[in-house]
Structures are given as C-alpha cells and as structure tokens.
Amino acid sequence: MSRSFVHVHLVALRYFGETVRTGSMRQAAEQLNVAASAVNRQILKLEDQLQCKLFDRRAEGVRLTAAGEVLYNYILRLDRDLERAVSQIDDLRGLRRGHIRLACEDGIGRDFLPTILSEFHAEYPGITYTVDVASALDILAAVAEGDADVGIAMAPPTRSDVAIHAEAAMPVGVIAPPGHPFARLSSIRLRDLSGERLVEARDGTGGGTSFFTHLGNGLPRSRFIETNAPDLITILVQAGLGVGVRTPVGIMNDIETGRIAFLPISDRVVAPTLTVFGKPQSTPSISGAVLIEMLKQRLPEFQLRVQAIAASAAASAPAAG
C-alpha cells in the first residue's frame, strides 16, 4: 500500500486538502474552479489506493476519519516543507541579505580566504561578514560555542562537538633566511636541524596543535624562541634569528619572491591539514551553507597551488657547493 501511494497524483492531494479546509466537496470545487464530481472522483481514487475511508460523508458536509486526519497532517507538513524549500531557493537565487561569522588563523586569512570571499561577494553582494583571527584552539572553541559559523585552521585537534566539512593536506618544511646555508638545499631532514636555533609556535597557536606536537618528538631539542604570533616567526627567521618549521600557507608570497627559503622535509611525516569545520547537528544559515560549499570546492585547487609553490621553491634552490 505504501509503495503505491507514492504514485498518487498531487492533484488528488490538493483536492483532498481543499475539501478539508472548506468542509465540503461542493465548496472545494468552487474554490478550485472544477466540477464537484471531479473532486469526488479524486478523493475516491485516494481512498481506493489507501484502502480506507478518508471522510465520513454527511448531508451538511464531510468529516475526517482517523485515517483522513493522518493524511491531512501529512499534507500540512508537505505544504510547510514546500514553502520552506521555495523560500530557500529564493534566498539562494539572490542571497540578498545575511551575515556570516568566520574564524581563521592569520596565514589562512592571508593566502586562502581573501580570493574566496572576493568571489563570494561578487556573486552575493548583500552578505556581510565578521572575520576573527585566532589560534586553532580558540577557533575550535568559537565554533563549538556557536560564536563562529565557519572555522578554518591548520592541523586543529579533533573535537566531538565540531564537524569537519573539508580538509586538505599541506606540505610542511623548514623556513630559513635567504642567506642561510639551508637556502642552498632542495630538501631537509629533521636531524639536519640539530644545533640550529628554532623559532616555534606556542602549542595551540598558528597550527601549533596536534600535528606540531607530534612533529616535535622528532625535532632536536634546540628551541630558541617560542611565540604565540605566527607572523612573528617569519619575521624573526627573516631577521636571521633562527629557522622555523611550518607550511607555506601564510608566507606564499614571501616564498615566491625569494624573501624566505622554504625547504620541504624529506622525512616521512604526517602532513598537517588545512581544515574547514562547523558545528555538528546544526543547520547553518543559507549564506553560511553556500559559503561552506564554495570553500569545499576551492580547497583542492588551493592545495595544488600550495604544493606547486613548495615544489618550485625546492627546484629553484641553488646547488649546494
């Protein structure tokens, strides 16, 4: 019975619903501008397919049976769902309004997010944004607590109250000033860092989370400077105060222009992931959902670009003397 009901024509449901609302088939026919016999025929078809009576027919009109009540409640839900779908489609067509709260790390905000927001704004100029720059751990907390609709971080730890929408592995390497002996290498091993001054991110800052804690187990214990500001790591390395370990994300322009050397790590390490995440079991706004889809679509392209920059940096390194 349930399988055959799927094939019921929507006209029959419409006639049935109008009969319930008006209280009689004659009045329903007047509202629908059809013959009363047509309304009766469609309702009889429903009753035949469901093998039960939907109305008690009386001289003064009709009254729903228990089965009719069930069907009418279904129609009401169907109408509400249809109206909601039409409204969402209308929003998708125009996205005339809306506000999206994003939280990301500074390097991601520099190299990944601007191009996407520019493209998104060109298509949906009525949307406004809040973009908070924070550490990976703070971004996770903001998403979990509902203070951010979308979070983007490098190598964040997992949390049961945060859902991953997309992720892509990023190359990791050592950064050094152009004049450093490392700058003449095309790749490097972790053991080569023995004796070097290391400029590192504090745990939970700028990707200094689970991945870098794991990586740190293989690093020589020669930490020289620790900071909670990822940008400062690059500045200190450029000033000749040491070398750092990081992905190219956030310093892609510096690598391409030769202001800093990037050497891929040749050891087999688990690559850190650039991750887009949000609150699980929570329906985002239409604008937020559309932006998340765009982020998911653009992430593989960005991954290829980062990999190409890392490979190009290695290939352009001068031969070691």
Image: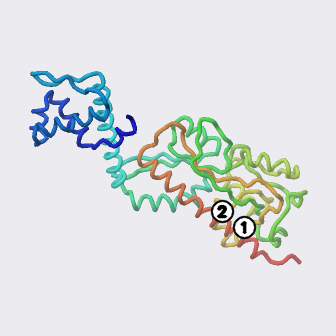
Callout 2: few (<14), some (14-19), or many (20+) C-alpha neighbours within 10 Å? many
The residue singled out by tag 1 in the image is: 260
- Give me the C-alpha separation between circle 2 and circle 1: 8 Å
The dot on residue 251 is 2
Residue 60: % across, % down: 10, 22
Residue at point 47% right, 47% down? 130
Residue 217: % across, % down: 84, 47
Sequence-first disc among 2 and 1: 2
In the image, is 240 to the left or to the right of 122? right
In the image, is 20 to the left or to the right of 109? left
Residue 65: % across, % down: 26, 22
The N terminus lies in which quarter of the figure?
Answer: top left
Q: Nearer the viewer, residue 192 or 271?
A: 271
Task: Please report contact status of discs 2 and 1: CB closer than 8 Å, yes or no.
Answer: yes
Helix, strand or loop status at disc 2: loop
Residue at point 51% right, 49% down? 131
The dot on residue 128 is none
Residue at point 55% right, 40% down? 143
Q: Amino acid at mark 1?
A: Ile
The C terminus lies in which quarter of the figure?
Answer: bottom right
Q: Nearer the viewer, residue 57 or 130?
A: 57
Q: Amino acid at mark 2?
A: Ile
In the rendered view, tell whether residue 13 sits above or below residue 256: above
Residue 6: % across, % down: 36, 41
